[in-house]
Image (cartoon, helix red, strand yellow):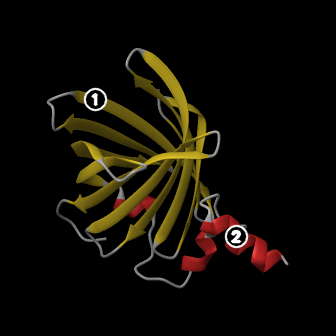
Amino acid sequence: MKRWLCALLGAIGLGGCAGSDVQHYAQERPVLVLEEYFDGRLDAWGMFQKRDGEVVRRFHVRIDAAWTNGVGTLDEHFTYADGETQRRVWTIRALGDGRYVGTADDVVGEARGEARGNALRWRYVLALPVDGTVYKVDFDDWMYLIDDKVMLNRSVMSKFGIRLGEVTLSFTRQGGEQ
């Protein structure tokens, strides 16, 4: 009965009964260690797609990242295709065992993340300004380390459990080896 219900809910777009678990990636390599990957200069290119798949924003992000005593700072500088710029500074604390918490000015409360194998699941609520109104939207980020320089990121943005769209990013580390 439960299998039938999961299939039905998945088929009508309400989601499955069980979400992906980061533990599923525990044996994947290379191992993602945030303190190593997010250290130094990174560039990322991304886009936001509405839930119907239409690309509505494209952007580049320059990230200057450094860690001191288990605390990381990711200084992100966004440049959108329309010329708009934005800055977000993350402060991330390593809790041990692949677990992290983070804050930024436009993040409501704390972001929480867990890394296993080559993957990181990072969840948070973002205060997102749109046409003069600020909306609190949920982000469910999945990051996958491809090699020592490239990481791919897929984020689902939702409100009240309703999927609003997706952000896709490709990160590239500049110089150095992991």
Q: Is residue 173 above or below residue 45?
A: below
Q: Position of residue 83 (x, y in %)?
A: 14, 30
Q: Is 167 or 106 nearer to us in this picture?
A: 167
Label 1 neighbour load within 10 Å: few <14, some 14-19, many 20+: few
Does residue 14 appear to the left or right of 53 in the view shown? right
Q: Earlier in the sequence, mark 2 or mark 1?
A: 2
Question: Label 1's element?
Answer: strand
Q: Is residue 39 above or below residue 32?
A: above
Q: Position of residue 148 (x, y in %)?
A: 29, 73
Quarter of the image for residue 170 reads bottom left
Residue 42 in view of the camera? no
* Residue matched to label 1: 86
Q: Is residue 28 above or below residue 35?
A: below
Residue ranking furthest to the right:
1
Q: As shown in the figure, which amino acid type bears the numbered disc 1?
A: Gln
Question: Label 2's element?
Answer: helix
Query: Any mark on residue 8, and which?
Result: 2
Query: Any mark on residue 24, and which?
Result: none
